């Protein structure tokens, strides 16, 4: 008998491990090269992360650990090996300037668990037990959890890119999905918006917030409008910076983005900036107004902590 041949298993079933191994070899290099970078949006990153599930499902199918193990030993050894391999991959990725993501370890496990859980269910000539069906259902639920997370990101990004002229929807209760710098939702000093964002500025060299998840296509508009509230009796100087994707993928030179100074007097302050000035801000090129990537507001070396409220942010 041919080694590895199982009577009753169709030829295509015997070829699956070879096909899975070949596909794994094609996919594996993308763990370290290519894929999303610093400038990529949340949806691409979320979809790309699903590749961990596919790769480790293929690897498990290629190796076929059930040839040597069964029962709880199969689950224990596969889980341990996947965790060890996944941890090694994450450490190596750190050397390639890729972000470490512990969630990838779970995705790796889901890929392997799906194969070893569903194999007894589909095995010809056998009837899966209730426990095996429960394990298969659990692995599938974990897969649906990951797919659902990507679906939520897709829905959120659709909303972001269709909310213009607003650059930020102030009805959101969790600004951390859109901003870095930890702004807080506030019911004070809003202007035609459900809420405002409270900015707590510290005394470090640069203190502020950055809108990293925003509508990217500013074409068809003429002006940027920002309304801020300064609760202090003293004026406050803030810097507004805007850049496109090309800047994110460059050396981040100061003269390759838009920078301007905003002086906040006590009370409400509304600033209007022409988008043509933003487009022509880079020294050696024009900014791609269809690929705006980030917008930041920050203070520099404040002598004492200050508070500011962002009340409105839109294009006109």
Image (spheres, rainbow, N blue to C red):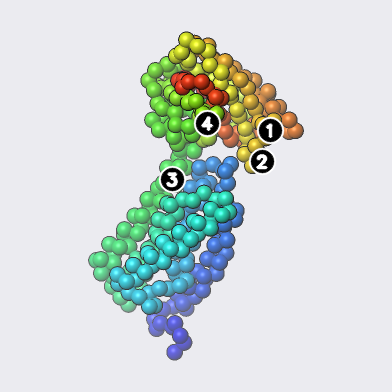
> What is the quadrant of the C terminus in the image?
top right
- Which of marks 4 and 3 precedes in the sequence? 3
Label disc, if present, on residue 250 of the rendered structure: 2
* Residue sitting farthest toward the left: 130
Q: Residue at x 57, y 33 (%)?
A: 294
Q: In the rendered structure, are the residues bearing label 3 and label 4 in contact, judged by CB atoms less than 8 Å apart?
A: no
Q: CA distance from mark 1 to mark 3?
A: 35 Å
Contact? badges 4 and 1 (CB < 8 Å): no
- Secondary structure under tag 2 reads loop
Q: CA distance from mark 4 to mark 1?
A: 17 Å
What crowding class fits label 2: few (fewer than 14 Cα within 10 Å), some (14-19), or many (20 or more)? few
In the image, 140 versus 98, the foreground residue is 98
Marks 2 & 1, CB-CB < 8 Å contact? yes
Ranked by sequence position, the earlier of labels 4 and 2 is 4
The residue where tag 1 is placed is 256
Residue hosting label 4: 210
User: Which of pointers 2 and 3 lies earlier in the amino acid sequence?
Assistant: 3
The secondary element bearing badge 1 is classed as helix
Marks 4 and 2 sit apart, C-alpha to C-alpha, by 18 Å
């Amino acid at each position: 008998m041919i080694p590895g041949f199982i009577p009753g298993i169709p030829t295509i079933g015997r070829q699956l491990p070879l096909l899975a191994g070949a596909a794994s070899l094609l996919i594996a290099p993308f763990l370290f090269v290519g894929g999303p970078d610093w400038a990529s949006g949340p949806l691409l990153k979320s979809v790309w992360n699903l590749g961990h599930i596919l790769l480790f499902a293929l690897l498990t199918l290629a190796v076929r650990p059930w040839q040597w193990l069964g029962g709880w030993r199969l689950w224990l050894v596969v889980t341990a090996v996947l965790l060890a391999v996944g941890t090694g991959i994450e450490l190596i990725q750190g050397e390639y300037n890729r972000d470490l993501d512990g969630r990838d370890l779970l995705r790796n496990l889901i890929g392997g668990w799906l194969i070893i859980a569903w194999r007894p269910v589909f095995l010809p000539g056998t009837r899966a037990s209730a426990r095996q069906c429960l394990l298969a259902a659990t692995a599938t639920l974990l897969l649906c959890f990951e797919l659902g997370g990507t679906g939520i990101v897709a829905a959120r990004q659709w909303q972001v890119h269709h909310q213009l002229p607003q650059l930020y929807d102030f009805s959101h209760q969790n600004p951390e999905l859109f901003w870095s710098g930890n702004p807080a939702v506030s019911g004070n000093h809003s202007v035609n918006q459900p809420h405002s964002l409270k900015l707590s500025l510290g005394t470090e060299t640069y203190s502020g917030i950055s809108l990293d998840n925003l509508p990217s296509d500013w074409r068809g508009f003429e002006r940027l409008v920002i309304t801020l509230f300064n609760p202090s009796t003293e004026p406050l100087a803030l810097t507004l910076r805007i850049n496109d994707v090309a800047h994110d993928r460059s050396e981040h030179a100061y003269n390759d983005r838009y920078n301007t100074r905003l002086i906040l007097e006590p009370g409400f302050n509304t600033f209007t900036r022409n988008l043509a000035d933003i487009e022509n801000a880079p020294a050696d090129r024009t900014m791609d107004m269809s690929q705006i990537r980030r917008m930041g507001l920050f203070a520099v070396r404040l002598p004492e902590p200050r508070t500011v409220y962002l009340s409105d942010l839109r294009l006109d």
